[in-house]
């Protein structure tokens, strides 16, 4: 699943469908037997089979420790002359693509006016040590999930680190820069995770104050996706840190192997929350294994349900230790593009016309379950701020204290006040955040209670 995008005015981004890019089908994810751990073992296997090792998947970049999981190119299929078991291979799966979760068919005209009106307000506001547009802080989605009540009444503004596996983040964005922590670009194998590198420094052509950048059917079809996801996390949990992990190219495609590497990095680098605004139609044993290992290290996972508008299982959202998130409109109806079903969805959150950060220090409007999921990741960060050792069971139970809707949307639409209230019930001695300037009505017209 990929996005088509058109950017208008301050920037308007609507996610539509695009064709899948050319894919390297020669890549395989290979696990060697536990008693044969080591890169030299895989090198010996590839020497016999004429395959090429690309990466170790269960070590950090630059780490030379023992490894049992690799991505390789040109591994021959098993045959009479190729016996995986005798060679020491435990399992093999294709390194299939995952896509960022936008695949809806919304026309730009359906919500252009409302979002452009909102984006027209560039009034700067102070927001927990950074600056942002008033339209971002005062948008309807924030009111719907009761962000201000969680921040200003319950004194929860977030803690820990949210790892975002995506297209990267604009590391210089003035709203996000104060909370960013060290990340990594797995598409280039370099430190950082700045997605602006994908644009080659070009912002497109500007005419009469309108950005005329056309991203449809291009290698930039999902450019900005990770920055927008990060902005939603920051809106909900402004004092949580964000770790950008770039596993997707700007065309919206990512190898499962790079996603696994990013999840391993998150778990080994101290992340508390894992946001996955992407999906696969088929399960992956090794992706599930990576999520399980991260969970054992205390990482709580959230994923988007996908945008096919069907009751279909998508992965990783459908895994039992991942909170799958559907999208709702401002009236709490299920978004027409959102997948649904009790086996897929834990809760829903607003996902239409979300105003959020966009590369080069600006803001955009976004649609899709990709932008519902980070609202829940932000909610998890609020709870982690109350108790750093919170478990998946505790946090998912608190998040489930939502506004009830239909059964197809799990426990209902996210309510941050209820979630944090449940958390304070679990951890009554949790420290309260200081009342920040953002709660002052001169900055934002915040709510005042349940």
Image (cartoon, rainbow, N blue to C red):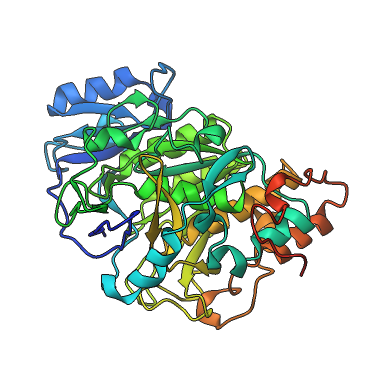
Residue 167 point in image, percent of width and height: 34, 43
Q: Is residue 17 above or below residue 42?
A: below
Picture quarter with the C terminus:
bottom right
Write the residue at 41% across / 54% down: 277
Of all residues, the one furthest to the front in this rendering is 208
Q: At 61% across and 45% down in the image, what residue appears?
A: 127
Residue located farthest toward the bottom when viewing the structure as drawn:
406
Residue positioned most to the right: 429
Residue 61: image quadrant is: top left
Task: Tell me if residue 147 comes above or below residue 381 in the rendering.
Answer: below
- List x then y, in percent, for residue 39: 33, 20
> Residue at 41% across / 37% down in the picture?
245
Q: Nearer the viewer, residue 59 or 7?
A: 7
Name the residue nearer the viewer: 184 or 437.
437
Q: Position of residue 329 (x, y in %)?
A: 47, 75
Please count the marks in the image: 0
Would you place residue 13 above or below residue 80 in this image?
below
Using residue 150 as the reference point, say whether residue 186 is left or right of it: left
Residue 337 seen in the current view: yes
User: What residue lies at 41% left-to-right and 71% top-to-bottom?
Assistant: 114
Q: Quadrant of residue 43?
A: top left
Q: Is residue 40 left or right of residue 300?
A: left
Place of residue 402 in the rendered image (x, y in percent of width and height, measured from the top left): 65, 71
Q: Is residue 91 visible?
A: no
Position of the N terminus, as image quadrant, is bottom left
Q: Is residue 442 left or right of residue 83?
A: right
Q: Report the front residue among 30 and 159.
A: 159
């Amino acid at each position: 699943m990929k996005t088509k995008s058109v950017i208008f005015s301050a920037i308007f981004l609507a996610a539509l469908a695009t064709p899948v890019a050319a894919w390297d089908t020669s890549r395989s994810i290979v696990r060697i037997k536990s008693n044969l751990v080591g890169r030299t073992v895989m090198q010996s296997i590839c020497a016999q089979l004429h395959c090429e090792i690309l990466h170790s998947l269960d070590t950090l970049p630059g780490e030379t420790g023992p490894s049992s999981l690799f991505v390789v190119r040109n591994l021959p299929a098993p045959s009479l002359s190729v016996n995986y078991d005798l060679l020491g291979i435990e399992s093999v799966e294709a390194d299939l693509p995952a896509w960022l979760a936008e695949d809806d068919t919304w026309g730009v005209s359906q919500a252009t006016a409302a979002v452009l009106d909102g984006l027209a307000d560039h009034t700067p506001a102070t927001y927990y040590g950074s600056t942002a547009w008033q339209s971002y802080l005062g948008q309807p989605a924030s009111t719907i999930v009761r962000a201000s009540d969680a921040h200003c009444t319950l004194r929860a503004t977030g803690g820990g680190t949210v790892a975002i596996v995506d297209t990267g983040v604009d590391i210089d964005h003035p709203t996000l820069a104060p909370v960013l922590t060290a990340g990594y670009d797995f598409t280039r194998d370099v430190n950082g995770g700045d997605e602006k590198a994908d644009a080659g420094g070009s912002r497109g052509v500007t005419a009469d104050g309108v950005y005329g950048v056309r991203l449809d059917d291009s290698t930039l079809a999902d450019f900005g996706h990770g920055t927008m996801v990060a902005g939603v996390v920051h809106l909900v949990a402004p004092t949580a840190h964000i770790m950008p992990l770039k596993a997707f190219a700007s065309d919206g495609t990512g190898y499962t192997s790079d996603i696994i590497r990013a999840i391993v990095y998150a778990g080994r680098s101290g992340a508390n929350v894992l946001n996955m605004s992407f999906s696969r139609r088929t399960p992956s044993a090794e992706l599930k294994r990576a999520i399980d290992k991260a969970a054992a290290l205390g990482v709580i996972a959230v994923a988007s349900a996908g945008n096919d508008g069907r009751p279909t299982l998508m992965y990783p959202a459908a895994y039992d230790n991942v909170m799958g998130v559907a999208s709702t409109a401002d009236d709490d109806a299920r978004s027409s593009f959102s997948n649904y079903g009790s086996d897929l969805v834990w809760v829903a959150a607003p996902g239409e016309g979300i105003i959020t950060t966009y590369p080069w220090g600006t803001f955009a409007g976004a649609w899709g379950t990709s932008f519902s999921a980070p609202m829940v990741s932000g909610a998890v960060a609020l709870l982690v701020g109350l108790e750093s050792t919170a478990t998946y069971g505790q946090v998912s139970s608190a998040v489930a204290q939502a506004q009830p809707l239909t059964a197809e949307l799990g426990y209902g639409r996210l309510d941050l006040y209820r979630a944090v209230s449940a958390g304070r019930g679990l951890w009554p001695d949790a420290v309260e955040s200081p009342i920040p300037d953002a709660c002052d009505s001169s900055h934002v017209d915040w709510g005042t209670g349940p």
